[in-house]
Image (cartoon, rainbow, N blue to C red):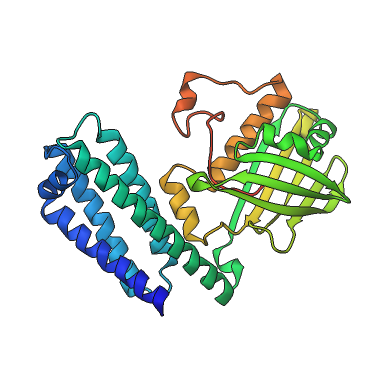
Amino acid sequence: MQEQRVVKGLGWFSLGLGLAEVAAPGRVAELVGMKSDGATRNRLRLYGMRELAAGVGILTQSRPAGWMWGRVAGDVMDLAYLASTRNSNHRNSGRTVAATAAVLGVTALDIYYARQLSDNGAQGSSSRDSEVHVVKTTTINKPPETVYQFWRDLENLPRFMSHLESVQSTGDGRSHWKAKAPAGRTVEWDAEITEDQPDARIAWKSLEGSDVENRGMVTFERAPGNRGTILRVELNYTPPGGSFASYIAKLFGEEPGQQIEDDLRRLKQILEIGDIVRSDASIHRGMHPARPSDQPLPSFT
């Protein structure tokens, strides 16, 4: 009951803040120490519409975990905007610092209750309800034997899977994984190989109790005319925080399918030319396979 009261209170807070930002953005800008120019007012109106949507979602849905995670994403955007305007668009830096501290406090509250709601929802429903399914294929100009051997050495995987911090083989086809997650978090899980056909197929699944439930398969097929290997990856996983975590990831440019596609491009570069090609274009998301990534996407095995 206490959890419900706090969550509903955060919903009403979203509505109140959203109304203020939409109806009186200039006044809100002054309260947080910003100049009340046209660009600032327009941005605050957009943020207000976001808050109104979150408030309505929290107050009307029986399972508002997704909307709470939406609040977390909005908090991150607010913090980034406050930080970017402290030196260039402020009238009172003291007010801006105070506003930043207040948003940090609300962010901590939002994260705590979003996780509580997600955990409760996971207990009351099947994890398949929030499962993400991704299939990606690429062709690598190397024989299946070479591609398979590189992949089968699990400690090679962090070389091209940008979200992975480490992979350690623990014996008997099992391994321990550590990956980057949003907001500076890390997630860990243990996995086991369920099928291993040399030069042809590797299947895996995570072990019970893992931070990230995942299963899938990678196949290595000789391309027509002996022109390399057709590599196909099929992945099913449940995002930490529930299905809405995938929506939040998209807000920050971390769509799961695109991330796997970028990982496979990096693998192709490593196997074909021996290194990952980087360029100035990699600073633009989605334009280059070498861009960094923080989305907590489980890997293969």
Please state if 147 lies on the left or on the right of 108 as rendered: right
The residue that appears at 31% across and 62% down in the rendered structure is 54
Please state if 194 lies on the left or on the right of 237 as rendered: right
Residue 249 in the image: x percent, y percent? Answer: 47, 49
The residue that appears at 79% across and 29% down in the rendered structure is 225
Residue 290 in the image: x percent, y percent? Answer: 56, 28
The residue that appears at 78% across and 48% down in the rendered structure is 175
Residue 257 in the image: x percent, y percent? Answer: 56, 46
Please state if 293 lies on the left or on the right of 222 as rendered: left
Of 148 and 121, nearer the camera is: 121
Residue 120 in the image: x percent, y percent? Answer: 52, 72
Image position of 294 with respect to 69: above or below: above
Corner quadrant of residue 169:
top right
Whether residue 133 appears in this view of the structure is: yes
The residue that appears at 29% across and 65% down in the rendered structure is 55
Please state if 232 lies on the left or on the right of 7 as rendered: right
Image position of 134 with respect to 82: above or below: below
